[in-house]
Image: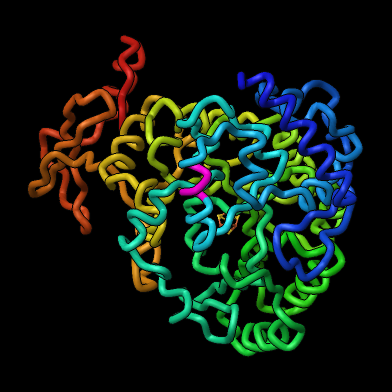
Amino acid sequence: MNTATKAAKSRSVYSSRAEAAGETHSAGPVEEEPPGRAVPTGSFDEDPPGSTATERDRLFGHVPDGAWNDWRWHFRNRLTKVEELASFIPLSSEERAQLKLVTLKYPLSVTPYYLSLINPDDPDDPVRKQAVPSILELTMGMVGREDPLDEKGDSVVPGLVHRYPDRVLMVLTDICPMFCRHCTRKREWRNGGWVRSPAQLEAMLGYIRGHKAIRDVIVSGGDPLTLSTPRLEGVISRIRAIEHVEIIRIGTRFPVVLPQRIDQELCDMLSRYSPIWLNTHFNHHREITPEAAAACDRLLRSGVPVNNQSVLLRGVNDSVAEQMELCHGLLRIKVRPYYLFQCDEVQGTEHLRTPVETGLGIIEGLRGHTSGLAIPTFVIDLPQGGGKVPLQPDYIVAKKKGELLLRNYEGQLFRYRNPRTQPEPVPESLSPLSSADADLLLETGVRVRS
Ligand code: SF4
C-alpha cells in the first residue's frame, strides 16, 4: 500500500472510529473532563510566526475547524493504542508487536495536533522521536533509575517537593496530553491518571503556609493544565492568598503539544493572579507552529511571561544548527530560551540521552555566534536531589597571579588583568591620564578603553 492510500485509509478509519465513539475515546481514566473551548483564532492581525508545514491536511483533513480548534476534542481523541497509531504512521508487523510490548510498561498518548507535526514517512523524524515509543525503552531499560532526582525523597507531603529553601514544586496530577518519551516522571504513567484530592491539596497548602521562606511555588504535574480552568483557579487563588508567596510558576507542555488549550478563559484567569510565570518545553523548531505562536502570544498579552526549558535529546536537537534554529524561533515568538537540560538518567530514556560534551559543544557553538538572549543555560539536574548545576565551556585557558588568559568564541587568546580584591597602588607606568594627556588623545581621535 502506498503512503497516499494509507493516509486515505487512516482518515476513513479515524473518521468512523471517532463517529462510533461519539468522539469520546479516552486515553485512560481521566478524573475529570478537560473543559473550556479554545478560542479558534489568535490575536494576530497578520500571520503569526512559525512553520505552517504540518500534516494536518493529509492526516486530519476531514476534521472540521471547530473540532480542530477545540482542545477537548484533541484530548478525547488522543491516540493511545499502537493500532491507532499504525493507521497514521507506517509500522511493520514486527514494529507493532515491539511497540505493544513497550506500551505495557510505558503507555502511549499522542494528541492529533502533535501527530500532525510528524512526518509519517520519516522513521527518524525528530518530532516523532518524542512521541512514538521505541523498543529501546525496554532493551536499554535497565540503565538509569526510575526516580533519578529522588523526588519521592524530597516530598514533604504527598505531591509537594521541597528541595531548595525558597521554592516548592506542587505535583497536581499525573495526567498529560502527551506522554513524551524522554519524560523524567515516566514512572508515574502506569498509575492510571489521578488528580490530587482536596485533602492532599490542603496538606500541601498548609505546608506552604507554615514555611515563610517559600516565596516561589511551581505548579506542575503531569500537566496541571489538564485540570479545568475553574479547578485550576481554585488552586492558584489559594496559593496567591498566602502572603509570603511572591511568584507562581506553571510548568506545562500544552503550548507545544496542544496549544488550543491556551484559550482566553485560561489567560483571563491567570491574569487575575499576577505575577504568574509559565515554563514550557519546545524541543525542536518544527514545534513552533502558528498555533503554538498564537498560544504564547495570548499568554504574553495576559501578562504571563513564557520561558522555555528544552531537553537535549539524541537525534532530536543535539546539534548547534538545530539549537540555533529553535532558539531563534523562540525569540521570534517572544519566548525566552531559559534552560537546556541534560536528559536525566531516567530508566527507558537512555537511547535519547547524549554525552555531556554534546551540550557543552552546543553552548560553545552558540556563544558569540548569536545574541546572548538566544542562549539557554545548559544544566544538569543532579541525581539524588542534588539540584541543578549550570555547565559552561571553559574559556579560561590559564590563570596566574593577577592575570587570566582567555579565549574568545573564535579561539583567539587574550590577556586580561584581574583586579585584586584590595586595590593596589597604580604602578607609575600605568599612572592615570592627566587632563592635558586626555585632551591630546581626544584631539588625535584615539579611543581610551577603561
Ligand atoms: S508533558 Fe511533561 S510531565 Fe507530561 S509526559 Fe511530557 S515531559 Fe512528562
Near-viewer residue (398 or 189): 189
Quadrant hosting residue 124: top left
Seen in the image, is 268 located left or right of residue 132?
right
Ligand 1 in which quarter: bottom right
Query: What colour scheme was applied to this rendering of the protein?
Result: rainbow
User: Where residue 368 sits in the image (x, y, percent)?
Assistant: 36, 28
Residue at 83% across, 45% down:
18
Q: Name above or below for residue 171 compared with residue 255.
A: below
* Residue 264 appears in the figure: no
Which quarter of the rendering shows the N terminus?
Answer: top right
Residue 381 image-quadrant placement: bottom left
Residue 153 visible (yes or no): yes
- x, y (%) of residue 110? 65, 47
From the viewer's side, name the closer residue of 243 and 11: 11
Segment tinted magenta in the rendering: 95-99
Please name whichever residue, 370 or 358, is drawn nearer the observer in this view of the structure: 358
Q: Which residue is drawn at 50% across and 48% down?
A: 97
